[in-house]
Amino acid sequence: MGEGQTIVIVGAGQAGGWAAQTLRSEGFAGRVVLVGDEPHRPYERPPLSKAVLAGEAPEGSTALMKPEAFDKLHIDWRADTAVSAIDRAARQVRLQAGDAIGYDKLILCTGGRARRLDIPGADLPGVFTLRSIADARSLGAALLPGKRLLVVGGGWIGLEVAATARRKGMEVTVVEAAARLCERTVPPEISDHLLELHTAHGVQVLLGTGIESFAALPQGLSAVLGNGQRLDCSAALVGVGMVPNDGLARAAGLQCDGGVWVDAQCRSSDPDILAAGDVAAWHGQWAGRRMRLESWQNAQEQGIAAARSALGMAVNHQPLPWFWSDQYDVNLQIFGMPAPGHERVLRGDPASGSFVLFFLEQGKVVAALGPNAAKDLRFARRLIERGTHVDAQKLADLQIPLAKL
Ligand SMILES: Cc1cc2nc3c(=O)[nH]c(=O)nc-3n(C[C@H](O)[C@H](O)[C@H](O)COP(=O)(O)OP(=O)(O)OC[C@H]3O[C@@H](n4cnc5c(N)ncnc54)[C@H](O)[C@@H]3O)c2cc1C
């Protein structure tokens, strides 16, 4: 791949931004077209539920790189431009405005969109979802001290918004249909910890309760919950997961099922079309199954991997999954993919607010997670990556530094 050739990236988010800058840092001198349907240069989303939403950091602080650095890459960046179709036979992407761009390689970094509720009143003003800077702007303006925010969904985004809204002086109710918080991603010990954390900060958490409808009030909304209870609020945030934007790929006949299927070289079922970030699904060595990772780390690393792969470089994208969340003064981190079948070892006292839960498979640590335990988790990461056999009793013993295991 070189001069005279064109690589088109669809989606100017985190993965797309990393793909574009990697093409240049790896020496690609051809044309790079980065098509994004948002008005912004590539940016990172984690602050949108935290400091940016709280109004403590400006929107611009989430930019992946400084505008001058981005401009120096000489990327043909098309802002506010949506790709509407891929014509694989003509090797072109079609833009919604009608024109087309030819490609030699195409990288899909289209991310996902917030899942919406299919209930009466879901589209009323005051019912928000959170994915983009525009969403954070709208939701942020509705975080009014003294008013009540209803958060639908006790997952990461819902809980982070709940924490931010409390910081802004709102009353907050979280309703979660499952029996515990973040049920899909963490074991019960961590769900319990999160429940205690939010309850201690004055959040009302209703578990095992869905939502049936929203209706408009003169000043706000009235929600009917699954248990029949009526709850009035000034605004609601729906945080019930995301849907991967794989529609373009599916319409083009690429293999997809809950995301664009790729291999560890980020190649889809058409080897000239690659995918990275939240939209890509591949066989993850750490999970032992096909998966998508909705995380900052994966968006960056898979964006880089896809760009290198497009240039014909050897790539094997199998990162140890890493995810973090910040709520109040708690930083929670997860390494690896904890599963119910793993042996569990607790290090530290949950009541202290800082502990690590290790997950072992045949004597090896395969995952670890915990709140406010960044130092131990750094060592845990090493144990996982090295596949070290450990003694469970020693792992649990706070007198034995993890560095010695
Ligand atoms: C509020 C929030 C908080 C988060 N917090 C954390 C956190 O604390 N820790 C963590 O690890 N992860 C967090 N994440 C997840 C992380 O931000 C995502 O995994 C990451 O943004 C995925 O990057 P991406 O490039 O795949 O997708 P995105 O960043 O979503 O980028 C995709 C881009 O493609 C555009 N697009 C889609 N279709 C088209 C089309 N047809 N034409 C043109 N453009 C298109 C989209 O509009 C978007 O701009 C958070 C996410 C959100 C939303």
Image (cartoon, grey):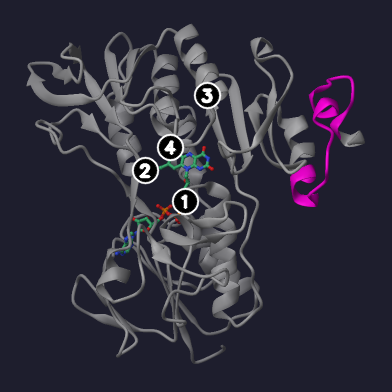
Asked if residue 308 lies left or right of residue 355, the reply is left
Q: Are marks 4 and 1 in contact (CB under 8 Å)?
A: no
Q: Residues within 10 Å of mark 4 (few under 14, many from 20)?
A: many
- Tell me the distance, in whole angstroms, between the alpha carbons under discs 2 and 3: 32 Å
Instruction: Identify which residue, 353 or 84, lies in the foreground.
Output: 353
The residue that disc 4 covers is: 48
* Disc 1 packing (10 Å; few <14; some 14–19; many ≥20): many
Q: Is mark 1 within 8 Å of ligand 1?
A: yes
Q: Position of residue 52 (x, y in %)?
A: 45, 33
Look at the numbered disc 3 and give the secondary structure of its residue. Answer: helix
Span colored in magenta? 382-402
Residue 229 falls left or right of residue 183: left
Tags 1 and 3 touching, CB below 8 Å = no
- Expressed as whole percent of the image width and height from the top left, the position of residue 247 reads 27, 64
Measure the alpha-carbon separation of dots 4 and 2.
7 Å
Q: Does 340 appear above or below 301?
A: above
- Please state which amino acid type lies under the numbered disc 4: Leu
Q: Is mark 4 within 8 Å of ligand 1?
A: yes
Q: Which residue is at a point 79% across and 24% down the rendered structure image?
A: 396
| Whole-percent x, y for residue 266 in the image | 52, 70
Residue kind at label 1, given as amino acid type: Tyr
For residue 43, the mark is: 1
> Is residue 121 shown in magenta?
no
Residue 307 position (above or below residue 158): below
- Residue 110 lies in quadrant: bottom left
The residue depicted at 27 percent of the width and 81 percent of the height is: 100
Q: Would you name the residue on which mark 3 appears? A: 188
